[in-house]
Amino acid sequence: MFTNKIAPSILAADYANFEKELKRIEETDAEYVHIDIMDGQFVPNITFGADVVASMRKHSKLVFDCHLMVVNPERYVEAFAQAGADIMTIHTESTPHIHGAIQKIKAAGMKAGVVINPGTPVSALEPLLSLVDQVLIMTVNPGFGGQAFIPECLDKVRVLKKLREKNHYNFDIEVDGGVDNKTISACQNAGANVFVAGSYLFKATDLVRRVESLRIALHD
Ligand code: DX5
Ligand code: ZN
């Protein structure tokens, strides 16, 4: 039921050529494209906004898994829906109105995701778990690619999986940060089924084989 999905993170790709990079991702058997939106406030780094996502949409049919690292993301729900985002995932730490923001994402016709930083406990998610389609557990502090995986974050994945079983919730569990062919199986064993990978995939020239190597590291 919670099938495995690989989500190459475009953060690690060549920003001067999204069309080409999206085609490269389409050639792999990855299900998602993970798109990191950063505003220079919630995290120090800046990427791009909904207009760029709308342009990307013309070049890919893959699921657009948008991870917003911005202050008050509820301001951008309509813009991302119109841009063609499939999943909009927002941080509990980024707004005092997280519940309303999740409702807004769903009302706009997108799948709603919620995400917590390494320093935030699972309890911050609990009021939202019956509403969301995806929960993202950060396995690095957000803002940059290429950081070292924080294994302690997997304890939260284990807790979430138990909560999901106990209450018959329906969300996918995603992990993001430092995921490669070595760390991915620990993520799966803890209970994750959506795996974001940036630098591990894009630092290689053969993206198809890199995605395959993640798939091989996963068991059924
Ligand atoms: C970090 C981003 C990630 C990033 C992961 O804030 O949310 O999606 O691209 O990059 P790697 O896989 O290199 O850790
Ligand atoms: Zn991300």
Image: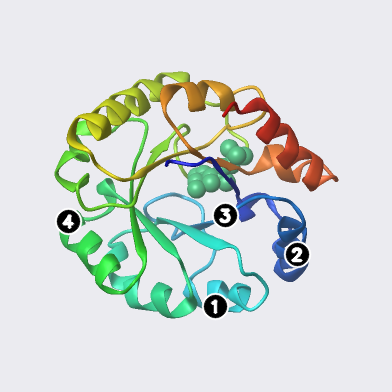
Q: Earlier in the sequence, mark 2 or mark 3?
A: 2
Tag 4 secondary structure: helix
The residue positioned farthest toward the right in the image shown: 205
* Amino acid found under the numbered disc labelled 3: Tyr
Q: How is the image coloured?
A: rainbow
Inter-mark Cα distance, 1 to 4: 26 Å
> Mark 1 = which residue?
54
Taking the image as shown, residue 37 lies to the left or right of residue 115, namely right
Disc on res. 23: 2
Give the spatial CA distance, label 2 vs label 1.
16 Å
Against 52, residue 196 (above or below) is above
Which of pointers 2 and 1 indicates the residue nearer the eye? 2
Residue type, label 4: His
Q: Nearer the viewer, mark 3 or mark 1?
A: 3
Task: Kindly state the secondary structure of the residue where label 2 is placed.
Answer: helix
Q: Where is mark 3, residue-wise?
A: 32
Q: Which mark is residue 99?
A: 4
Q: Residues within 10 Å of mark 4 (few under 14, many from 20)?
A: some
The answer to whether the residues at label 1 and label 4 have Cβ atoms under 8 Å apart is no
Q: Position of residue 92 (x, y in %)?
A: 26, 47
Q: Quadrant of the C terminus?
A: top right
